[in-house]
Image: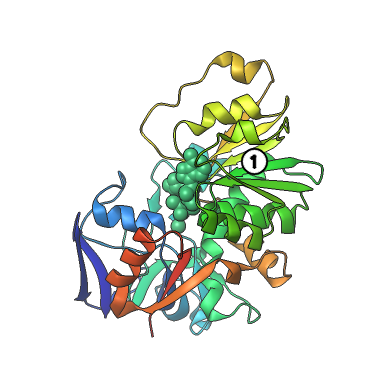
Amino acid sequence: MKSVVIEQPGELTLQQRPLPAPAPGEVRVKVRYASICGSDVHIWHGHNPFARYPRVIGHEFFGVIDAVGAGVDAGRIGERVAVDPVVSCGHCYPCSVGRPNVCRELQVIGVHRDGGFSEYAVAPASNAYRVPESIPDKLASLIEPFTIAANISAFLQPTAQDVALIYGAGPMGLTAIQVLKGVYGVHQVLVVDRLPERLAMAQQSGADAVFNNSEVPLAAQLEGIQPTLIIDAACHPAILAEAAAIASPAGRIGLLGFSAEPCTLTQQSLTSKELSLFTSRLNSRRFPQVIEWIERGAIQPEKLVTHYFPLAQVEQAMTLFEKDPRTCCKVILSVE
Ligand code: NAI
Ligand code: MN
Ligand code: ZN
Protein backbone atom coordinates (compact mmCIF):
# COMPACT_ATOMS: atom_id res chain seq x y z
CA MET A 1 0.00 0.00 0.00
CA LYS A 2 1.02 3.63 -0.46
CA SER A 3 1.41 5.66 2.74
CA VAL A 4 2.48 9.19 3.60
CA VAL A 5 5.33 8.76 6.06
CA ILE A 6 7.15 11.41 8.04
CA GLU A 7 10.49 9.62 8.35
CA GLN A 8 11.85 12.24 10.73
CA PRO A 9 11.09 15.94 11.27
CA GLY A 10 11.21 17.72 7.91
CA GLU A 11 11.18 14.54 5.79
CA LEU A 12 7.85 13.76 4.13
CA THR A 13 7.78 10.74 1.83
CA LEU A 14 5.22 8.71 -0.09
CA GLN A 15 6.22 5.08 0.55
CA GLN A 16 5.21 1.61 -0.44
CA ARG A 17 4.49 -0.28 2.80
CA PRO A 18 3.25 -3.79 3.63
CA LEU A 19 -0.51 -4.09 4.06
CA PRO A 20 -1.21 -4.20 7.83
CA ALA A 21 -3.24 -7.12 9.20
CA PRO A 22 -5.87 -6.09 11.76
CA ALA A 23 -4.94 -7.31 15.26
CA PRO A 24 -7.56 -8.92 17.51
CA GLY A 25 -10.30 -6.37 18.16
CA GLU A 26 -9.26 -4.21 15.22
CA VAL A 27 -10.61 -3.42 11.80
CA ARG A 28 -8.70 -2.51 8.66
CA VAL A 29 -10.07 0.44 6.73
CA LYS A 30 -9.53 1.02 3.02
CA VAL A 31 -9.22 4.78 3.22
CA ARG A 32 -11.19 6.93 0.74
CA TYR A 33 -10.73 10.48 2.03
CA ALA A 34 -8.50 12.07 4.67
CA SER A 35 -8.37 15.72 5.63
CA ILE A 36 -5.31 17.77 6.49
CA CYS A 37 -5.08 19.36 9.94
CA GLY A 38 -2.59 21.84 11.35
CA SER A 39 -1.22 19.08 13.56
CA ASP A 40 -0.21 17.02 10.49
CA VAL A 41 1.89 19.95 9.36
CA HIS A 42 3.34 20.25 12.87
CA ILE A 43 4.38 16.59 12.89
CA TRP A 44 6.01 17.07 9.47
CA HIS A 45 8.05 20.01 10.77
CA GLY A 46 8.85 18.39 14.12
CA HIS A 47 6.69 20.80 16.14
CA ASN A 48 4.35 18.28 17.73
CA PRO A 49 5.63 17.25 21.18
CA PHE A 50 3.66 13.97 21.14
CA ALA A 51 4.74 12.60 17.74
CA ARG A 52 7.03 9.58 17.33
CA TYR A 53 8.90 8.94 14.06
CA PRO A 54 8.73 7.42 11.50
CA ARG A 55 4.99 8.00 11.38
CA VAL A 56 2.14 7.61 8.90
CA ILE A 57 0.24 10.83 9.64
CA GLY A 58 -3.47 11.65 9.33
CA HIS A 59 -6.12 11.48 12.05
CA GLU A 60 -9.17 12.73 10.10
CA PHE A 61 -10.18 9.92 7.77
CA PHE A 62 -13.01 7.93 6.28
CA GLY A 63 -13.16 4.67 4.38
CA VAL A 64 -14.64 1.19 4.15
CA ILE A 65 -13.83 -1.75 6.43
CA ASP A 66 -12.14 -4.40 4.30
CA ALA A 67 -10.85 -6.83 6.95
CA VAL A 68 -11.47 -7.56 10.63
CA GLY A 69 -9.29 -9.05 13.35
CA ALA A 70 -10.20 -11.87 15.72
CA GLY A 71 -13.27 -11.17 17.82
CA VAL A 72 -14.74 -8.58 15.44
CA ASP A 73 -18.02 -9.26 13.63
CA ALA A 74 -17.13 -10.13 10.02
CA GLY A 75 -20.49 -8.60 9.07
CA ARG A 76 -18.79 -5.23 9.40
CA ILE A 77 -16.75 -5.82 6.24
CA GLY A 78 -18.01 -3.32 3.67
CA GLU A 79 -19.22 -0.84 6.31
CA ARG A 80 -18.52 2.85 5.61
CA VAL A 81 -16.75 4.27 8.67
CA ALA A 82 -15.19 7.38 10.13
CA VAL A 83 -12.39 6.62 12.57
CA ASP A 84 -12.08 8.25 15.98
CA PRO A 85 -8.33 8.79 16.48
CA VAL A 86 -8.55 8.59 20.30
CA VAL A 87 -7.34 5.18 21.49
CA SER A 88 -7.61 4.68 25.25
CA CYS A 89 -6.97 1.95 27.84
CA GLY A 90 -10.51 1.83 29.22
CA HIS A 91 -9.62 1.43 32.90
CA CYS A 92 -7.53 4.36 34.16
CA TYR A 93 -9.08 7.26 36.13
CA PRO A 94 -9.93 9.52 33.14
CA CYS A 95 -11.29 6.53 31.20
CA SER A 96 -13.41 5.54 34.22
CA VAL A 97 -15.06 8.99 34.28
CA GLY A 98 -15.85 9.05 30.56
CA ARG A 99 -12.83 11.04 29.43
CA PRO A 100 -10.79 8.59 27.32
CA ASN A 101 -9.38 11.55 25.38
CA VAL A 102 -7.04 12.22 28.30
CA CYS A 103 -6.38 8.53 29.08
CA ARG A 104 -3.13 8.02 30.95
CA GLU A 105 -2.04 5.78 28.08
CA LEU A 106 -3.58 7.91 25.33
CA GLN A 107 -2.59 6.91 21.81
CA VAL A 108 -3.75 9.17 19.00
CA ILE A 109 -3.97 7.55 15.57
CA GLY A 110 -1.77 9.55 13.20
CA VAL A 111 0.35 10.87 16.08
CA HIS A 112 1.37 8.02 18.41
CA ARG A 113 0.47 5.26 15.95
CA ASP A 114 0.08 5.07 12.18
CA GLY A 115 -2.76 7.03 10.66
CA GLY A 116 -4.95 7.59 7.66
CA PHE A 117 -2.84 9.31 4.98
CA SER A 118 -2.50 5.85 3.52
CA GLU A 119 -4.38 3.43 1.31
CA TYR A 120 -5.19 1.34 4.41
CA ALA A 121 -5.19 1.94 8.16
CA VAL A 122 -5.99 -0.23 11.18
CA ALA A 123 -7.92 0.89 14.26
CA PRO A 124 -9.79 -0.64 17.19
CA ALA A 125 -13.22 -1.75 15.95
CA SER A 126 -14.90 0.44 18.57
CA ASN A 127 -13.18 3.50 17.07
CA ALA A 128 -14.76 2.91 13.65
CA TYR A 129 -18.18 4.58 13.52
CA ARG A 130 -20.70 3.69 10.84
CA VAL A 131 -21.43 6.64 8.57
CA PRO A 132 -25.02 6.82 7.28
CA GLU A 133 -25.60 6.96 3.51
CA SER A 134 -26.85 10.55 3.81
CA ILE A 135 -23.28 11.73 4.57
CA PRO A 136 -21.25 11.58 1.35
CA ASP A 137 -17.77 10.03 1.25
CA LYS A 138 -16.22 13.39 0.32
CA LEU A 139 -17.34 15.00 3.60
CA ALA A 140 -17.09 12.16 6.11
CA SER A 141 -13.48 12.88 7.12
CA LEU A 142 -14.77 16.17 8.58
CA ILE A 143 -16.67 14.43 11.36
CA GLU A 144 -13.49 14.43 13.47
CA PRO A 145 -12.80 18.21 13.44
CA PHE A 146 -16.42 18.83 14.47
CA THR A 147 -15.92 16.54 17.47
CA ILE A 148 -13.46 19.11 18.84
CA ALA A 149 -16.22 21.73 18.86
CA ALA A 150 -18.64 19.16 20.27
CA ASN A 151 -16.26 18.38 23.11
CA ILE A 152 -15.60 21.94 24.20
CA SER A 153 -19.31 22.76 23.86
CA ALA A 154 -20.14 19.92 26.24
CA PHE A 155 -18.10 21.76 28.87
CA LEU A 156 -19.37 25.24 28.04
CA GLN A 157 -23.07 24.28 27.82
CA PRO A 158 -24.08 27.02 25.36
CA THR A 159 -27.62 28.38 25.58
CA ALA A 160 -29.70 30.50 23.22
CA GLN A 161 -29.25 33.59 25.40
CA ASP A 162 -25.44 33.49 25.27
CA VAL A 163 -23.44 36.16 23.54
CA ALA A 164 -20.54 34.04 22.31
CA LEU A 165 -17.14 35.21 21.10
CA ILE A 166 -14.81 32.98 19.13
CA TYR A 167 -11.16 33.83 18.65
CA GLY A 168 -9.84 32.53 15.33
CA ALA A 169 -11.74 31.63 12.16
CA GLY A 170 -9.59 28.69 11.12
CA PRO A 171 -11.12 25.22 10.89
CA MET A 172 -11.51 25.06 14.68
CA GLY A 173 -13.22 28.42 14.99
CA LEU A 174 -15.48 27.71 12.01
CA THR A 175 -16.65 24.36 13.37
CA ALA A 176 -17.33 26.05 16.72
CA ILE A 177 -19.44 28.76 15.02
CA GLN A 178 -21.53 26.15 13.23
CA VAL A 179 -22.08 24.13 16.40
CA LEU A 180 -23.01 27.16 18.52
CA LYS A 181 -25.46 28.47 15.93
CA GLY A 182 -26.81 25.28 14.38
CA VAL A 183 -26.93 22.95 17.36
CA TYR A 184 -27.30 25.21 20.38
CA GLY A 185 -29.12 28.14 18.75
CA VAL A 186 -26.85 30.72 20.38
CA HIS A 187 -28.40 34.12 19.83
CA GLN A 188 -25.24 36.02 18.96
CA VAL A 189 -21.92 34.58 17.82
CA LEU A 190 -19.12 37.11 17.37
CA VAL A 191 -15.86 36.14 15.72
CA VAL A 192 -12.45 37.81 15.71
CA ASP A 193 -9.54 37.07 13.36
CA ARG A 194 -6.76 38.99 11.67
CA LEU A 195 -7.48 37.86 8.12
CA PRO A 196 -10.46 39.31 6.24
CA GLU A 197 -10.73 36.15 4.12
CA ARG A 198 -11.09 34.04 7.24
CA LEU A 199 -13.71 36.44 8.62
CA ALA A 200 -15.67 36.03 5.37
CA MET A 201 -15.59 32.26 5.96
CA ALA A 202 -16.87 32.90 9.50
CA GLN A 203 -19.85 34.78 8.07
CA GLN A 204 -20.45 31.89 5.68
CA SER A 205 -20.50 29.55 8.67
CA GLY A 206 -23.10 31.68 10.46
CA ALA A 207 -21.25 34.32 12.50
CA ASP A 208 -23.53 37.23 13.42
CA ALA A 209 -20.71 39.80 13.59
CA VAL A 210 -17.01 39.69 12.78
CA PHE A 211 -14.09 41.81 14.01
CA ASN A 212 -10.63 42.24 12.58
CA ASN A 213 -8.09 42.82 15.37
CA SER A 214 -5.03 43.19 13.13
CA GLU A 215 -4.84 46.93 13.83
CA VAL A 216 -7.36 47.88 16.50
CA PRO A 217 -7.53 45.70 19.64
CA LEU A 218 -10.77 43.79 19.99
CA ALA A 219 -11.77 45.42 23.30
CA ALA A 220 -11.85 48.83 21.61
CA GLN A 221 -14.24 47.50 18.96
CA LEU A 222 -16.73 45.69 21.20
CA GLU A 223 -18.40 48.89 22.46
CA GLY A 224 -19.02 47.44 25.87
CA ILE A 225 -20.40 44.07 24.73
CA GLN A 226 -19.44 41.49 27.36
CA PRO A 227 -19.45 38.00 25.89
CA THR A 228 -20.94 35.36 28.17
CA LEU A 229 -19.14 32.48 26.45
CA ILE A 230 -15.69 32.69 24.83
CA ILE A 231 -13.82 30.03 22.86
CA ASP A 232 -10.16 30.52 22.11
CA ALA A 233 -9.62 28.78 18.77
CA ALA A 234 -6.69 31.02 17.79
CA CYS A 235 -4.61 29.95 20.77
CA HIS A 236 -2.04 32.72 21.07
CA PRO A 237 -0.98 32.77 24.75
CA ALA A 238 -1.90 36.49 25.06
CA ILE A 239 -5.57 35.80 24.33
CA LEU A 240 -6.59 34.34 27.69
CA ALA A 241 -5.92 37.56 29.60
CA GLU A 242 -7.88 39.58 27.05
CA ALA A 243 -10.74 37.09 27.17
CA ALA A 244 -10.90 37.34 30.96
CA ALA A 245 -10.91 41.13 30.75
CA ILE A 246 -13.80 41.38 28.29
CA ALA A 247 -15.93 38.46 29.53
CA SER A 248 -19.25 39.04 31.23
CA PRO A 249 -19.44 38.27 34.96
CA ALA A 250 -20.41 34.59 35.30
CA GLY A 251 -19.01 33.95 31.81
CA ARG A 252 -17.28 30.77 30.66
CA ILE A 253 -14.04 30.55 28.69
CA GLY A 254 -12.97 27.50 26.66
CA LEU A 255 -9.33 26.94 25.75
CA LEU A 256 -8.05 24.71 22.94
CA GLY A 257 -4.39 25.74 22.76
CA PHE A 258 -1.21 23.76 23.36
CA SER A 259 1.32 26.60 23.52
CA ALA A 260 4.22 26.02 25.91
CA GLU A 261 4.53 29.76 26.52
CA PRO A 262 3.00 31.11 29.76
CA CYS A 263 -0.35 32.93 29.76
CA THR A 264 -0.08 35.86 32.16
CA LEU A 265 -3.23 36.82 34.02
CA THR A 266 -4.27 37.67 37.54
CA GLN A 267 -6.48 35.65 39.87
CA GLN A 268 -8.55 38.80 40.31
CA SER A 269 -9.38 38.95 36.61
CA LEU A 270 -10.99 35.52 36.90
CA THR A 271 -12.35 35.45 40.45
CA SER A 272 -13.87 38.92 40.61
CA LYS A 273 -16.26 37.91 37.83
CA GLU A 274 -16.42 34.25 38.92
CA LEU A 275 -15.38 33.15 35.43
CA SER A 276 -15.25 29.46 34.59
CA LEU A 277 -12.29 28.21 32.59
CA PHE A 278 -12.53 24.95 30.65
CA THR A 279 -9.92 23.18 28.56
CA SER A 280 -10.70 20.57 25.95
CA ARG A 281 -8.51 18.07 24.13
CA LEU A 282 -9.65 16.04 21.11
CA ASN A 283 -12.97 14.34 21.91
CA SER A 284 -14.53 11.89 24.31
CA ARG A 285 -16.64 9.56 22.15
CA ARG A 286 -18.45 12.35 20.34
CA PHE A 287 -18.55 10.82 16.85
CA PRO A 288 -22.19 9.61 17.15
CA GLN A 289 -23.32 13.06 18.24
CA VAL A 290 -21.59 14.82 15.32
CA ILE A 291 -22.87 12.23 12.82
CA GLU A 292 -26.39 12.92 14.05
CA TRP A 293 -25.87 16.70 13.73
CA ILE A 294 -24.73 16.35 10.11
CA GLU A 295 -27.57 13.96 9.30
CA ARG A 296 -30.22 16.41 10.43
CA GLY A 297 -28.54 19.39 8.78
CA ALA A 298 -27.66 21.24 11.99
CA ILE A 299 -24.06 21.67 10.76
CA GLN A 300 -22.71 21.90 7.21
CA PRO A 301 -19.22 20.41 6.80
CA GLU A 302 -19.14 21.33 3.08
CA LYS A 303 -18.75 25.00 4.05
CA LEU A 304 -15.26 24.26 5.36
CA VAL A 305 -13.85 22.58 2.27
CA THR A 306 -11.74 24.61 -0.14
CA HIS A 307 -9.60 21.98 -1.91
CA TYR A 308 -9.33 18.30 -2.87
CA PHE A 309 -6.02 16.70 -3.93
CA PRO A 310 -5.08 13.12 -4.78
CA LEU A 311 -2.95 11.39 -2.13
CA ALA A 312 0.08 11.45 -4.46
CA GLN A 313 0.06 15.27 -4.26
CA VAL A 314 0.17 15.31 -0.47
CA GLU A 315 3.24 17.54 -0.22
CA GLN A 316 1.73 20.15 -2.53
CA ALA A 317 -1.56 19.95 -0.61
CA MET A 318 0.08 20.35 2.80
CA THR A 319 2.28 23.20 1.58
CA LEU A 320 -0.72 25.10 0.20
CA PHE A 321 -2.65 24.45 3.42
CA GLU A 322 0.22 25.75 5.51
CA LYS A 323 1.25 28.76 3.44
CA ASP A 324 -2.09 30.09 2.29
CA PRO A 325 -4.64 30.46 5.09
CA ARG A 326 -6.37 33.18 3.09
CA THR A 327 -7.56 30.76 0.41
CA CYS A 328 -7.45 27.46 2.31
CA CYS A 329 -9.59 26.01 4.98
CA LYS A 330 -10.05 22.24 4.91
CA VAL A 331 -7.90 20.53 2.29
CA ILE A 332 -8.94 16.92 1.68
CA LEU A 333 -6.87 14.10 0.18
CA SER A 334 -8.71 11.59 -1.98
CA VAL A 335 -7.10 8.21 -1.67
CA GLU A 336 -8.65 6.24 -4.55
P1 NAI B 1 -5.55 27.96 12.13
O1 NAI B 1 -4.17 28.40 12.29
O2 NAI B 1 -6.05 27.56 10.78
O3 NAI B 1 -6.54 29.08 12.65
C1 NAI B 1 -6.22 30.02 13.62
C2 NAI B 1 -6.85 31.34 13.22
O4 NAI B 1 -6.63 32.27 14.28
C3 NAI B 1 -6.24 31.93 11.96
O5 NAI B 1 -7.26 32.25 11.04
C4 NAI B 1 -5.48 33.17 12.47
O6 NAI B 1 -5.50 34.23 11.54
C5 NAI B 1 -6.25 33.51 13.73
N1 NAI B 1 -5.49 34.21 14.78
C6 NAI B 1 -4.22 33.99 15.17
N2 NAI B 1 -3.88 34.82 16.18
C7 NAI B 1 -4.98 35.58 16.43
C8 NAI B 1 -5.26 36.61 17.37
N3 NAI B 1 -4.35 37.01 18.24
N4 NAI B 1 -6.49 37.16 17.35
C9 NAI B 1 -7.42 36.74 16.46
N5 NAI B 1 -7.21 35.76 15.55
C10 NAI B 1 -6.01 35.20 15.53
O7 NAI B 1 -5.75 26.75 13.16
P2 NAI B 1 -6.96 25.74 13.49
O8 NAI B 1 -6.74 24.46 12.77
O9 NAI B 1 -8.27 26.40 13.33
O10 NAI B 1 -6.64 25.44 15.02
C11 NAI B 1 -6.69 26.49 15.95
C12 NAI B 1 -5.97 26.10 17.23
O11 NAI B 1 -6.65 25.03 17.86
C13 NAI B 1 -4.52 25.65 17.06
O12 NAI B 1 -3.73 26.33 18.00
C14 NAI B 1 -4.54 24.18 17.37
O13 NAI B 1 -3.37 23.74 18.00
C15 NAI B 1 -5.71 24.08 18.32
N6 NAI B 1 -6.36 22.78 18.27
C16 NAI B 1 -6.72 22.23 19.46
C17 NAI B 1 -7.39 21.04 19.51
C18 NAI B 1 -7.80 20.49 20.81
O14 NAI B 1 -8.33 19.39 20.83
N7 NAI B 1 -7.62 21.17 21.92
C19 NAI B 1 -7.68 20.28 18.29
C20 NAI B 1 -7.32 20.97 17.07
C21 NAI B 1 -6.67 22.17 17.09
MN1 MN C 1 -7.42 17.60 13.43
ZN1 ZN D 1 -7.25 5.09 30.13
- Residue at horizontal 31%, vertical 64%? 319
Q: Please state which of residues 187 and 1 is positioned toward the viewer in this rendering.
A: 187
Q: Position of residue 176 (x, y in %)?
A: 61, 52
Q: Secondary structure at mark 1?
A: helix
Q: Tell me if 227 is positioned left or right of 330 in this view.
A: right
Quarter of the rendering containing residue 276: top right
Q: Residue at x 69, y 58 (%)?
A: 206
Residue at the (56%, 15%) spot, across then down: 267
Query: What residue occupies the far right of the structure in this picture?
Result: 161
Q: Nearer the viewer, residue 56 or 199?
A: 199
Question: Dot 1: few (<14), some (14–19), or many (≥20) neighbours within 10 Å?
Answer: some
The three-letter amino acid code for the residue at tag 1 is Phe
Q: Position of residue 284 (x, y in %)?
A: 55, 50
Residue 305 pos. (x, y %): 52, 70
Q: In this figure, which colouring scheme has been used for the structure?
A: rainbow
Q: Is residue 186 above or below residue 64?
A: above
Asked if 138 appears above or below 123 in the picture, the reply is below
Depicted 232 relative to depicted 27: above or below: above
Left or right relative to 120: residue 253: right
The residue pinned by badge 1 equals 155
